[in-house]
């Protein structure tokens, strides 16, 4: 699924199951919460913290999908064409960062 269709799918889900979008501030708080859940899994599973028994069955993919869902909600409710914005961002990063990363001794 491309980003445009993902935005449409989220909008359809909101209209059919979610009643309405939460306001932007509520969704921003929700996004922060979801990113925190991703950070918890990464820190414990791939970082130096020990993983709690209760966290061992948490699905990183599911938590990342929660982040994407809320980002798509925010894009929809603020009128952002995320596919277009993401494409522009990739172009900008390719132009701006290509030499910088290739010349970074820390990455060799």
Image (spheres, rainbow, N blue to C red):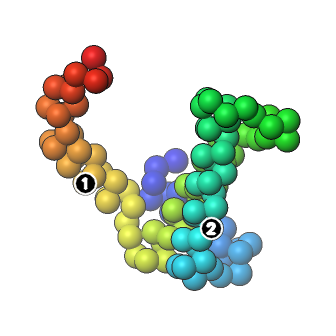
Residue 30 is marked as 2
The mark closer to the camera, 1 or 2, is 2
Q: Tell me residue 54's x, y (percent).
A: 85, 41
Total label count? 2
In contact (CB < 8 Å): disc 1 and disc 2: no
Residue at image point 75% right, 34% down: 51
Q: Quadrant of residue 19?
A: bottom right
Q: Tell me residue 37's x, y (percent).
A: 66, 51
Vertical side of 63 occupied by 32: above or below: below
Q: Nearer the viewer, residue 41 or 1?
A: 41
Horizontal side of 76 relative to 17 (left or right) equals left
Q: Residue 10, can we see it?
A: no
Vertical side of 13 occupied by 104: above or below: above
Vertical side of 71 occupied by 45: above or below: above
At mark 1, the secondary structure is helix
Horizontal side of 93 relative to 85 (left or right) equals left
Q: Residues within 10 Å of mark 1 (few under 14, many from 20)?
A: few
Vertical side of 63 occupied by 71: above or below: below
Q: Nearer the viewer, residue 22 or 37?
A: 37
Q: Residues within 10 Å of mark 2 (few under 14, many from 20)?
A: some
Q: Residue 82, can we see it?
A: yes
Residue 23 is marked as none
Q: CA distance from mark 1 to mark 2?
A: 26 Å
Q: Which residue is mark 1?
A: 88
At mark 2, the secondary structure is helix
Horizontal side of 107 relative to 75 (left or right) equals left
């Amino acid at each position: 699924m491309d980003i445009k269709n993902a935005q449409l799918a989220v909008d359809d889900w909101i209209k059919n199951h979610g009643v309405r979008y939460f306001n932007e501030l509520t969704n921003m708080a929700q996004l922060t919460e979801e990113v925190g859940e991703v950070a918890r899994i990464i820190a414990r599973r791939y970082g130096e913290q020990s993983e709690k028994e209760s966290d061992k069955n948490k699905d990183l993919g599911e938590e990342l999908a929660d982040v994407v869902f809320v980002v798509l909600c925010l894009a929809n409710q603020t009128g952002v064409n995320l596919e277009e914005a993401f494409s522009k961002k990739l172009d900008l990063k390719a132009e701006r960062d290509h030499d910088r990363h290739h010349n970074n001794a820390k990455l060799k």
